Amino acid sequence: MTTAPTGVPGHVPLVHLLRDGLVEGVHHGSVVVLAPDGSVLFRAGDADTACYPRSAAKPIQAVAMARLGLSVPAHLLALAAASHSGEPFHLAGAECLLESCGAAESELGNPAALPYDPVERDRWVAAGRPARKLAHNCSGKHAAMLHTARMHGWSTVDYLEPDHPLQRAIADTVQDLSGEEIAHTAADGCGAPLFAVSLRGLTAAIGRIAGAPDGTPDALVARAIRAHPEHVAGTRRDVAALMKAVPGLIAKDGFEAVQVAALPDGTAIGVKIADGADRARLPVTLAALAAAGVDPDLLAPFAPRDLTVTGELGRAHDRRNQP
């Protein structure tokens, strides 16, 4: 098992922002497409230097908890892998996870926040409601972590410490699914340990989850994500809409413009935009999915008009779009 090197990634230009045909902005990044056996089908930029997966790691964290015996209805398992929008059904689900293990909102280790979705946030503010831990986009994951810890009789006050049994199990799962040693450990914005691996390793992990054999904990997580994409994101989020549009797709976005997605056979894509600009994430994701064999007609409704994918990835996407 190797460890991804740390340092400045060798990102390349991936997206052009156009205004009346003139390039106004350029987004650099890296992208990789892996076959089900983990071999590289396409790569641009640097897929081998360590990076933070941010919330794109949540399906892996959910798999770790499922392997530890977390057994909840599918929509709540999907919520355990979510960066949710803060819609009422998300908060109700997180509350259900807490109630089912006898935990309280105050025990959540994530900070208080307003809903992530702008529509929900505006409604929240207009109603004069204060920030709540339950409204944080990671509350489903944290509620599932509390549930898993209580199920095993582990302490919960320190469940976010890297040496807690829960977090050690998650680290082991990251290494198992990515095929890499963890290169660096930090704290994510929600307070949970954040384990750095390469973009290739992260992509391999999501591919293994998507292609996991039926009946395994990994396959249960993949099935939950496929069945409940709105619980993983929200009713107004592109990642949920993509999963509904592409049969069998599982997908997860993360802050700083990280994106992973995988087809049922384990073919997987990974994207990292260097400057963290979310507007560049979607067009590169669409081009990578086309390079992975997804019908471009399924992806066309999501394509932004003013952003063009450049280089060989753009050419591969154009070839896929030709009759």
Image (cartoon, helix red, strand yellow):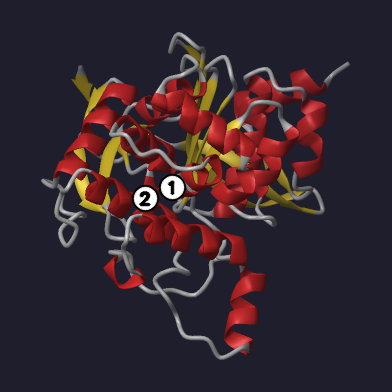
- Which kind of residue does numbered mark 1 sit on? Ala
Q: Find disc 1 in the rendering and name its residue.
A: 80
Q: Position of residue 220 (x, y in %)?
A: 48, 29
- Which kind of residue does numbered mark 2 sit on? Ala
Q: CA distance from mark 2 to mark 1?
A: 6 Å
Q: Is residue 80 above or below residue 115?
A: above
Most distant residue in the bottom direction: 128
Residue 291 is drawn in which quadrant?
Answer: top right
Point out the image quarter for the N terminus.
top left
Q: Is residue 6 visible?
A: no
Q: Find disc 2 in the rendering and name its residue.
A: 144
Give the residue displayed 57% in from the left and 14% down from the top: 265
Q: Is residue 218 visible?
A: yes
Q: Position of residue 185 (x, y in %)?
A: 19, 45
Q: Position of residue 241 (x, y in %)?
A: 70, 44
Horizontal side of residue 278 vs 218, given as left or right: right
Give the residue displayed 53% in from the left and 54% down from the top: 277
Q: Element under label 1?
A: helix
